[in-house]
Amino acid sequence: MYFLYTIIASFVSFFILKWMKKRRFCTDLTRLDGKTVLITGGNSGVGKDSAIALALRGARVIIACRDADKAEKAVREIKLRSRSLNVLHMELDLANLRSVREFCKSFLQTEKRLDILINNAAMPSVLDWTDDGFSMCFGVNHLGHFLLTNLLLPRLKECAPSRVVTVTCSTYKYQKLNFQDLNYNLLPFFTYCRSKLANIYFSQELARITEGKGVTSYAVHPGFVQSGWTCHYSFLFRMLMQVIMWMFFVAV
């Protein structure tokens, strides 16, 4: 009998969890015609769904990512689902600061507007290095976006009111930043936590220095979402995480 109660309780708990994580949809239908939105990592996950939602509202959407093939495939899907042709891809490697500078130079030459910048691209907890000698996770998640935002900030001010949205995570609370050594404690999970904390510090400072200048800055945690971040790990880990994400994470 106790076994039966355990089974019933497990099923009830499971369906309660599924109900709690069910999707909520934005009901604000404000049009964005004439606005230009730049999204890093807009070829998958939260970034791609954000690109679709923004294109549906009439925005010109530019997704910036490293893999051209994946980006073009995502652009085709975004155009199809949004019924908008005003979607394109520009190549950007956030792990290489020279690439960031070249991207910004090209963007500023070809695009006259930038109304919304979404710093969405992220590298999970992996032990690797950027071309500039920083932890891959910290370099992509924070340093690349830091440089990108600063180089594009004049254009954001020109197009005010504009905004910068930086995607972070609640794991920021598990680490502190050592400004004298950004590569200290290279355990991958802690490096990821530090990068998300840096995102928040940067968003706060950006909000302070742009106050009254028409640019608003936000740090956003989208919740735990099913996405393709597990592709950087082993097959066994991916299979385990697929089960966990299906049970507890929100589908995009």
Image (cartoon, grey):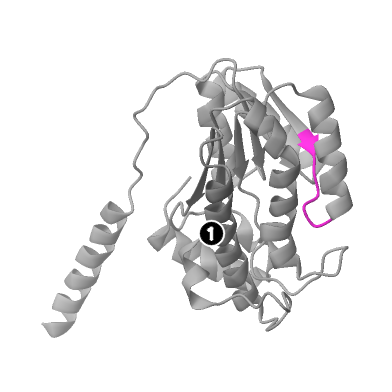
Q: Position of residue 9 (x, y in %)?
A: 18, 71
Looking at the rendered structure, the kind of residue marked 1 is Ile
- In the image, is residue 155 part of the stretch drawn in magenta? no
Q: Quadrant of residue 230?
A: bottom right
- In the image, is residue 94 part of the stretch drawn in magenta? yes
Q: Position of residue 191 (x, y in %)?
A: 65, 74
Q: Position of residue 81 (x, y in %)?
A: 55, 25
Q: Is residue 179 above or below residue 223?
A: below
* Residue stretch rendered in magenta on the structure: 90-96
Q: Residue at x 58, y 47 (%)?
A: 209
Q: Position of residue 21 (x, y in %)?
A: 33, 54
Task: Using residue 98 as the reference point, say whether residue 221 is left or right of it.
Answer: left
Q: Residue at x 18, y 82 (%)?
A: 3
* Viewer-side residue, 228 vs 215: 215
* Viewer-side residue, 157 vs 94: 157
Task: Using residue 7 as the reference point, say whether residue 163 is left or right of it.
Answer: right
Mark 1 lies on a secondary structure that is helix
Q: Is residue 227 above or below residue 115?
A: below
> Which residue in the protein does label 1 denote?
200
Task: Pick the quarter of the image with the N terminus.
Answer: bottom left
Q: Is residue 104 above or below residue 189?
A: above
Can I make out residue 115 in this image? yes
* Viewer-side residue, 136 vs 117: 117
